[in-house]
Image: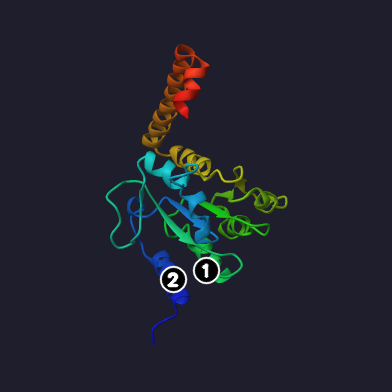
Amino acid sequence: MTPEPLDALDADLRAEADRDRDPAVTPDIGIIMGSDSDLDVMAGSETGREGAYDALTALGFAEQTSYSDPPADRFTFETFVVSAHRTPGLMYTYAETAADRGIDVIIAGAGGKSADLPNMTASIAYPLPVIGVPVQEKSLPSVIGMPQGAPIVAVDAGKSYNAALSAVQILARQHDGLRDRLEALHADRQADVARVSRRLHEDGSPQFKADRE
């Protein structure tokens, strides 16, 4: 009998955890979200703020979509929808197996007032670091509301881009190449500010504003 989709996904995660793969071919970062409606925040939107996907790909990470056929890139990440309320068993399996599947950091995002995915994942995956992303402002108290002794790192609402940078900062402690990439990205952002500042100064405020409209 063909297993139900949820059972099959659960089994795949557990089977991958049991395999002995070279860390170079397993995802370094796991991105999970409570619903696919969170994707624009967690990955980034063409019409809105950049997200975790944008940050990681800018730093040379590739998205891994197959365990048996990983990208050639040294650093990779994976993406799943894992609902704390609708699929609590899958959340438990994902968090419990993350370290054995090669994950070093988890970025977990959830929306609504009961945004429990990040903190529950942090509890189950401990001591693996989990960075929580409140998808909405109203999600913030739920994401950061962990008791003493149950740590989670969290970013401001909607800022999964920062969560990705923080995840890479953690990895960069062991990988000098990632540190170099972070410094290069930061230098690019500084240069962007300098270019804008010079344009504003040389064009004057009315012309600069008109050019932006």
At label 1, counting other C-alpha atoms closer than 10 Å, the crowd grade (few under 14, some 14-19, many 20 or more) is: many
Q: Is residue 110 above or below residue 158?
A: below
Question: Which is more toward the observer, 180 or 5?
Answer: 5
Count of picture labels: 2
Provide residue 79's location: percent of width, then percent of height: 44, 57
User: Which residue corresponds to mark 2?
Assistant: 9
Mark seen at residue 90: 1
Q: Is 63 on the left-hand or right-hand side of 153? A: left
Provide residue 67's location: percent of width, then percent of height: 34, 61
Question: Quick one: label 2 or label 1, which is nearer the N terminus?
Answer: 2
Q: Is residue 34 above or below residue 128?
A: below
Q: Is 6 on the left-hand or right-hand side of 142? A: left
Tell me whether the residue at label 2 lies in contact with that at label 1, contact meaning CB atoms closer than 8 angstroms.
Answer: yes
State how far apart marks 2 and 1 are (Cα): 8 Å
Question: Which is more toward the observer, 173 or 135?
Answer: 135
In terms of image quadrants, where is residue 179? top left
Question: What kind of element bears circle 1?
Answer: helix
Question: What kind of element bears circle 2?
Answer: helix
Provide residue 182's location: percent of width, then percent of height: 42, 33
Q: Residue furthest right?
A: 148
